[in-house]
Image (tube, grey):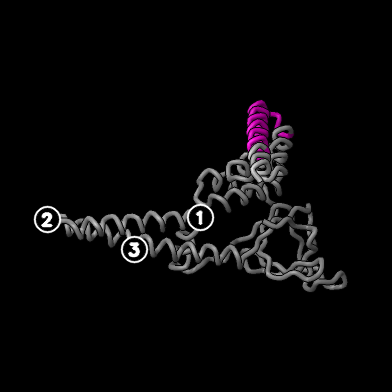
Amino acid sequence: MNKLVYLLFICFFSLSAQNKDLFQKANTAYNEGNYSDAINNYELILENGETSAELYYNLANAHYKLSHIAPSVYYYEKALQLNPGDSDVKNNLEFAQRMLIDEIEEVPKTGLLKITNKLISVLSFNGWAWTAVIGSILFAAFFLLYYFSNSSRQKRLFFTTSIIGLILMLSALIFAFQQREFNENSQFAIIFSEEAIIRNEPTLRSNEILMLHEGTKVKILETFQNWIKFELANETQGWMDKSDVRFL
């Protein structure tokens, strides 16, 4: 048993060192303008089972430099899944989206719903979970200070701070579960085919209703055999071949 644990320990650190070396090589290749080599090394890290927002971000940047529309949008979106509040990723995603052929205007949401969704998307599920932990620590610590304090002024201060911690904890818990529910119930994909034929039914005999192009993001509503039913940001729905997309 001890030998097995030791072997696993050695394998883990060996793979970690290999990935670190690949990451450095990829970054060097990127800085030298060898974007294809950078992509190859970044993808080797992914094949080794390691993922991170930074890795996806760098991979997206390399694809963007080569004007690879779909991969750049895809990996920026993957980076945002792990780090929703990263402004650099959001800005670069906007640049990549300017290369898209399809111009799809999002249906505007109501004021309160828009604010709530924007607030929830600031952090990932884990980010909100850690925020809840910090809030609970603040609540417990300042409530104890309030309980054992003899000064009325300090009591007011500690009690107010403990309530703030409690509100932070409860709000973060609510946002964390809403974030998880959104991730579990909402699946998105990026079109990777240069042109994707959209039909009104999941059959080749059905009518073609429009054509979409690489890099466009779609929300998956349903799957049927080799077909997916999707919805665009403007609420247009249709069916396309599953091979046309890569799921996020």
For marks 2 and 1, give the CA distance.
Answer: 38 Å
Q: Mark 1 points at which residue?
A: 126
Q: Which amino acid does label 3 sit on?
A: Ile
Region in magenta: 11-36
Q: Quadrant of the C terminus?
A: bottom right
Q: In this view, does 239 lie to the left or right of 150?
A: right
For marks 3 and 1, give the CA distance.
Answer: 18 Å
* Residue for point 51% across, 47% down: 86
Q: Nearer the viewer, residue 210 or 125?
A: 125
Closer to the chain start, of discs 2 and 3, is 2
Closer to the chain start, of discs 3 and 1, is 1
Q: Is the magenta stretch mostly helix, strand or loop?
A: helix
Q: Reply yes or no: does residue 34 show up in magenta.
A: yes
Q: What residue type is labelled 1?
A: Asn
> Residue 179 at x, y = what percent?
52, 62
Q: Which amino acid does label 2 sit on?
A: Ser
Q: Mark 3 points at which residue?
A: 167
Q: Is residue 55 left or right of residue 84?
A: right
Q: In which quarter of the image is residue 29?
A: top right
